[in-house]
Image: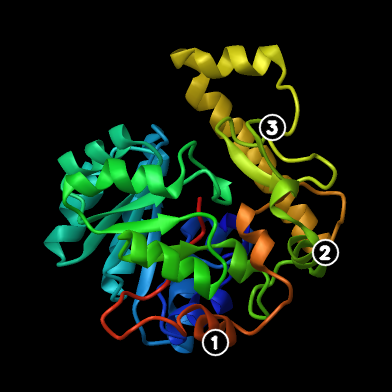
Amino acid sequence: MYPCSNPELVAAVSEAGGIGVIQPLSLTYVHGYGFQEGLEYIRSLTRRPLGFNVLIESSSRRYRERMEGWIEQALEGGVRFFITSLGKPDWVVRRVHRAGGLVYHDASEEKWARIGVDCGVDGLICVNNRAGGHLGSRSAEELYRLCAPLGRPLVCAGGVSTAAGVRTMIELGYQACQLGTRFIASRECTASAAYKQAIIDAHADDVCRTIKLTGVPVSVIRPGSGGGDCGDHPRWLEALLRRPATRRMTRLLLSLKAARAMKRALDSGATEQAWSAGKSVEGIDRVQPVAEIMRELTRDLTLEQKPVISSETS
């Protein structure tokens, strides 16, 4: 959801009863808002709870200082739900807990879940092998079995786009679901018509994995790929990603390149693009208003069950 988390979509999800998650890089880089300006705009559209996504892998001091500043502004703006990903969340937990907020940590494997728990996170986002964007290698069932003993609320991320899918995950034991791909095909999302149509036209087998975009596995739609891996990865890229000395810089450069390409495609409506999406495309057959999507997703849930959460699935 990184390039697709426009303010109107974030606000609409919260207004409809979920938790719309602000992605600060998307808000500032893709959509061109100053962070405070963008936050105030979202707040003008909804007064309901919002979330905030913290990407914490970068070792750059400048990036860390910028992210710390955004977290402070978010807390001052009333945000109390934070999702951390791609790093050790200890410093985020300390700051958010002082303000009475909650931190949930992305985990695609048990070891990342344990790191989050050791840092004091309040819950875990279990990113499975059907997710859009950065994805894991395990099924939703496997991740639940591995993470349930850690004693934290668990959110299923990946493969859900229908009421039946939400109900299945809740019955399995998850407290909530995080959806991204489903909300790209919404009226409030400012993604191009070509992107939305690609999601509608795609089947689960059209979604494949690649490391070429960011240096870690990312799921994209590539018609005719037949699913699985998107193709062979260059040996030089694999070599750079294996070496600790070059891994982070390589991932950063790839991510910047991919972000620029996606932004150009979103602005131009280009159709020759590896659109990011998860295998939940299988359940999406039309573009709908967010409120209608939310009503359909939650129609089978009781009042005691948790809300659906929308995120950028970094």
Depth check, front residue: 57 or 127: 127
Depth check, front residue: 158 or 196: 158
Under tag 1, what secondary structure?
helix
Above or below residue 191? Residue 298 is: below
From the image, state whether disc 2 or disc 1 is nearer to you.
1
Q: Mark 3: which amino acid?
A: Asp
How many residues crowd around disc 2 within 10 Å: few (fewer than 14), some, or many (20 or more)?
Answer: some
**Mark 2, residue position:** 194
How far from the left and from the top, in percent, is residue 28? 54, 61
Q: Mark 2: which amino acid?
A: Ala
Res. 237 in view = yes
Q: Label 2 to label 1, Cα distance in Å?
A: 22 Å
Which residue is located at x 23 percent, y 37 percent?
Answer: 114
How many residues crowd around disc 3 within 10 Å: few (fewer than 14), some, or many (20 or more)?
Answer: some
Under tag 2, what secondary structure?
helix
> Is 210 on the left or on the right of 272, as rendered?
left
Above or below residue 173? Residue 66 is: above
Quadrant that contains the N terminus: bottom right
How many residues crowd around disc 1 within 10 Å: few (fewer than 14), some, or many (20 or more)?
Answer: some
Q: Label 3 to label 2, Cα distance in Å?
A: 23 Å
Q: Quadrant of residue 222?
A: top right
**Mark 1, residue position:** 291
Total marks shown come to 3
Of the numbered discs 3 and 2, the one sitting upstream in the chain is 2
* Labels 2 and 1 touching (C-beta < 8 A): no
Res. 107 in view = no
Q: Mark 1: which amino acid?
A: Ala
**Mark 3, residue position:** 229
> Is 210 on the left or on the right of 7, as rendered?
right
Which residue is located at x 58 percent, y 15 percent?
Answer: 240
How far from the left and from the top, in percent, is residue 60? 41, 34
